[in-house]
Image (spheres, rainbow, N blue to C red):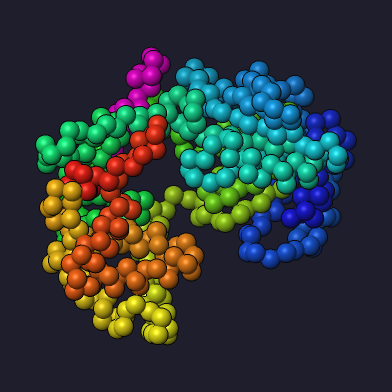
Amino acid sequence: LESFLSTAPNPSVGSNSDNMYCRPLVTAILFVGVTWGKELLNEEDSAEPSNCQSMLQVTKKPGANLKMYEAGPGQYTGHLTVHLDPHDVTSPKIQLEIFKWNASSKVPRAGALLAHMGGPGSTADGAGNVAFFVTQAGYDLYGISQRGIGKHAYPSFTSCNNFHLPPKRQGPYKVSDFTSCPCRLADGTPMIGEAWADVNPNSRTEVSKLFEKVAERSQRCRDSFDMNNFGFQGKGYNFLDYAGTQMLAHDIEELRTAIGEQTLNFWGISYGTYVAGVYASAYPQRVGKVIMDGNVVPMPEKTALASGCGAGLQQSINKLLYNCKEQASTCSLKNPDEDFRKLLKKMKKSKIVARTDSGKSFKLTVGMLGGWFQEQLVVDATTWGKVPKKLADLLSKDPKVSEKAAGEILDVKCYLQDPQTHKKTYTWRVYDVC
């Protein structure tokens, strides 16, 4: 990586035109845990004819839409003002959080690099995770918060967190008893996560209900982001129509222009590779070097994501059971395949339960177990090793052992956390609801 970043540095403002890039030069690297050398960058490709310099002329003065303030030695924070619709100067203006770390003065300046740490949802200050390395390589480092993200974002995706705990033992409880946020799940929605849902996928009724409830929530959420609700009168703008990756690419281009750089280097991690790909496609002449670290498919393909998550989970479970058979002496499941089928059968008959504080039986469902599996089987080998023991405990003939194991799984999924104190309330235990 040091070799990559130090070869053919991007021109800073005012550089000799012979060093300018004219056509797209994007070098993508997939991090695979190996070291590499100078052969990754064809140095001859970095030289472009000087007759293309007019394509890259930009103002040397930082744009008036960027305000930065010193936050520490060599560190700055501020905001970039952009139009909601980048193609309509009459559209409302919003502000995006910006962080900057100056390049080290001990090495020649190599240009500017923007780091996006993934998400969606990472904030501008997250770029600080790579600040030491990037600045020591001679780059000014920038971070940008995506629209709706960050402490000072307005509108904000995270500002409504007004959950409250209702009086105990006055249930049954529903989602609206805990929050009035417009983007909350509709009452009666099965518990869901990013890539799992507490439904039987073989039940058309359960799946249809899930879609209907999510559609209800989504429409209510969308209505709440009408810009008229935020004091912007006039044309019917909705913030959600201007908050995607394409808009972020426009905003990054606004930042590049504001800081007076002819080209911008990019380090994208996870979803940040998606952002890097979109920006490089939209503004190929403005891109220097691009590091793609943990690639994400650069298009919104929800069906592929869902089927991929399902297939990946099934493969992980199969591998887990295979490991148990291969390491029979240390695995808590003595007949892994048979024990797993037996567990699923018992769960479908609502025979795996935990006890709430009120003494009621709270069933652990197959959907909830699937959500728990997703978290446990994507971390590392130490987590994998604990899963067979938990499954064996669920099958235990001792009700106390089985109920304890079920409760520990429910604790992972069924809780609310106070944003101020960070204290967790396990709703399934206290309120008999997940």
Verify whether residue 229 appears in magenta.
Answer: yes
**Relative to the observer, which residue lies in front, 228 or 98?**
98
Q: Which residues are magenta?
A: 218-236
Tell me what residue is drawn at x 57 percent, y 45 percent: 117
Tell me residue 196's x, y (percent). 32, 56
Residue 364 part of the magenta segment: no
The relative height of residue 414 versus residue 385 in the rendered view (above or below) is above
Residue 280 can be seen in this image: no
Q: Is residue 369 above or below residue 215?
A: below
Q: Nearer the viewer, residue 260 or 364?
A: 364
Going 40% across and 68% down the picture, which residue do you hit?
386
Q: Position of residue 351 (x, y in %)?
A: 14, 66
Left or right: residue 433 compared with residue 162: left
Tell me which corner region of the image, top left, top right, bottom left or bottom right, holds residue 258. Answer: top right
Residue drawn at the location 54% of the way across and 27% of the way down: 96
- Which residue is at a point 35% across and 35% down the rendered structure image? 418
> In which quadrant of the rendered view does residue 1 lie?
bottom right
- Can residue 421 be seen in this snapshot? yes
**273 and 89: which is toward the camera:** 273
Question: Horizontal and vertical percent for residue 186?
Answer: 21, 39
